[in-house]
Amino acid sequence: MNPPSPDAVSATDSRPRIAVVGSLDARREYDPPLRDLDRARAACHELGRALALASYDLVVFSDRDHYAETLVVRGYAAVATRKGRVEAHRARHQEYTPELPEGASVRITTVRDIGDEWEVPFYRTLLAADGIVLVGGGRSTRVAGILALAQGIPVTPLAAFGGAAEQVRVDMARSEHHATAEHVQVLGESWSAESARRVTGLLRAQMERRVESRRRERRSRRLDRWAESGGLVAAILLLLVALAAIVLVPGPGPGPAGTATLALLLGAPMCAAVSGALIRDSFGVSPSALRACARGLGAGAVAVLTYVAAQLLTAPELLEGLDARRLLFFVVPMGFTAGFTFDLVFERLRRGDPKGTTSPP
């Protein structure tokens, strides 16, 4: 049976999944250097207890003693809770066998990747986590923190103990994130008896801000879709109105142009122009129905009035024997084309080249 993917696990579990990343190895050199290793290890144990009491699940990657997640898991398992779960991500040939306190009731789920490399599944798992805690650590911890900041994942680096976590805390202060300036300041304070509880509270606050941010994004996308749909519906209705004008124009054959005839002759192509502009605008990156209407109306007015003016210059008596229906068959498509290609219309006007808008039908 194949192990569940990180996304599948997250989708079926309502408890937040917190990934713990970092190392506290006295034999390694860190930049910045680690500080107060004994206190850091005790802090990991305290943090594990606080995460268990806050009803979080853990996501870990190693069971070696010099990794922060191992120490956090021991503190997590020390809390008597049957709902707590540790999700261990390992390579296909590796086992996860942490040393837990006697009588620990925490559930351990091992998720094995099909490959032998750890980098890809490691970072993919971080992207699926609800939050990330960083303690000490080197390059991978720094990359994990930068990834969290870039993707908007709640992250709490324990800067008090140095290592890459301290650098990530500095990065948080210089980037937009779900953490407030007050939260960033708290993460830089010295570790105290209340720090573990405060860190879990900061995680909760960041997750709530992330949920609210996503809710606003969904609402914005929904409004954008409604606006786009409304613009297309308006474009269809305006085009139908323009076509209906051909049928509604009074009287068959040529005749004097009355007020109603002139209104249809000018209004129909304007409606078609706005329709074309709205349809064109729906293809854009950031549609704006109001801007499209203004541009379409302007382009349609320029194109149609330029054409009519040219006809009046060559035939001054045009309005006395106007075949409005015949003319509408030409000016309605002209208006639609002008609205749909308003950028070309305005470019021609800027160059002083009205060619293409003054040809008779």
Image (cartoon, rainbow, N blue to C red):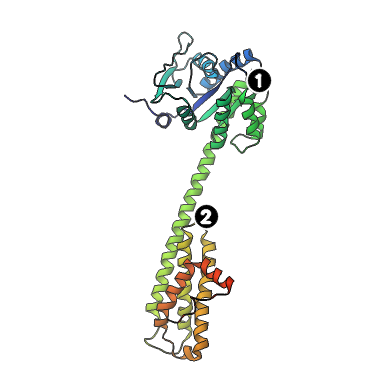
| Residue at the image point whose x is 68% and y is 21% from the top | 190
x%, y% of residue 291? 54, 62
- Residue 10 visible in the shown view: yes
Dot 1 or dot 2, earlier in sequence: 1
Of residues 83 and 32, which is closer to you in this image?
32
- For this orientation, the residue located farthest to the top is 102
Which residue is pictured at 56% across the width and 72% down the height? 349
Q: Kindly identify the residue that appears in the image at 64 percent across and 17 percent down.
A: 193
Specify the quadrant that holds the N terminus: top left
* Quadrant of image for the C terminus: bottom left
**At label 1, which amino acid type do we have?**
Pro
In the figure, residue 191 lies in which quadrant?
A: top right
204 left or right of 243?
A: right
Secondary structure at numbered mark 1: loop
Residue matched to label 1: 33
Residue at the spot of label 2: 286
- SS type, badge 2: loop
Q: CA distance from mark 1 to mark 2?
A: 48 Å
Q: Quadrant of residue 114?
A: top left
